[in-house]
Amino acid sequence: MHTTNRSLIQAGRVAAITFFAAAGLSLHAQQPAAAAAPAYPTLNLQAALKTPLNLFATPESDSSSSSSSSDTTDALATERFTLSDSTQPPPRRRYGRPRYTDGSHNPDGSNKYTFAVGGGFTLPTGGTHDYFKLGYDIQGGVGRNFNKNVGLMVDFNWANFGIQTNTLNNQLALYNSLQANLSQISGSGHVWSFALDPIYNFAQSDKTGAYVTGGVGFYHKTTTFTTPAVGEYCDYYGYCYQYVANQPIDSYTSNAIGVNAGLGYTYKPSRFANERFYVEARYVYTANSRRAETGTTAANTPSGSTAFNAFPQNSAPTTFIPITFGVRF
């Protein structure tokens, strides 16, 4: 009995194994053959690096490429470089010097209006040096610049002079001969003028420059002789004080047309600064008409004349060189 049961169990196991094996073979027969793995080309890095880059080449499409590969090729062809493409930037424009249109600048950028102020010393020359000696100089001016090179100035100049010692001694003897009874005298002279002076800047850089100037103007010449005198001053409270001051005893004036010419050098502390320091030297000539000495002796005094001229040098032509240091705006 037991033997029969054991045989039946083994037969069932063999039948089950046979059934599952047959089912597996049937499923394997129904599945399609797997697609073969694509073959990739061999990558040669050394050959790729040695090959020159061609920016204008259109990538070639392989007949076996997929639709995504075709789209990529079309995009690359659309975005390739073309030197004549309208999307390239325009050529660089050529720019000249800036043109100014405001009221205070010329088209070349120079200031339309200019101002100058300065001072220095004055050297008398020629016959003027026989009676005048070294003095000081004050200068001021305003003008119009037509461009960075050419301008026109209206200059005011005050040239002050001392008087030579031998001239003072001669005048003292002359006044005492006329019963003046003076112990000593002193004096000074000056020439003030207004002149119309063109100016030409012939050399300019970022910081330095040079110019020539000259013109014609009106010149007024004065010489005054003084002697020490004792004066008295009383204040508000009634206290009085004595002092010694120079009192004029004789004065002469003369007017004339004159000319001047000079050379100057300028320096700017910065290339962007408006002010320029300058030093210049001019030669000045005034065409005074010399008047004769009168009233000092009977020989040089016309009959019935009351004129008195003890210093005819004041009406003589005058020459001097003012050397000025200043600043221009």
Image (cartoon, helix red, strand yellow):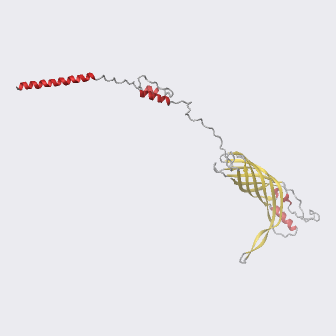
Q: Residue at x 13, y 25 (%)?
A: 12
Q: Write the residue at 86% across / 65% down.
A: 174
Pinpoint residue 276: horizontal percent, then vertical percent: 68, 51
Percent x, y for residue 186? 79, 65
Task: In this rendered view, identify the residue nearer to me: 265 or 33.
Answer: 33
- Where is residue 200 shown, x and y percent of the image? 74, 47
- Nearer the observer, 242 or 210: 210
Q: Is residue 22 left or right of residue 168?
A: left
Work out whether 222 lies above or below 182.
above
How many callouts does the rendering have?
Answer: 0
Relative placement, left or right, of 328 versus 11 is right
Left or right, residue 276 beside residue 168:
left
Residue 318: which quarter of the image? bottom right
Residue at 85%, 58% in the rendered image:
315
Q: Is residue 216 left or right of residue 95?
A: right
Q: Residue furthest right?
A: 303
In the image shown, does 86 or 169 lie closer to the viewer? 86
* Whether residue 127 is situated above or below residue 81 in the rendered picture: below
Q: Quadrant of the N terminus?
A: top left
Q: Position of residue 270 (x, y in %)?
A: 63, 50
Q: Pick out the residue farthest to the left.
A: 1
Quadrant of res 237? bottom right
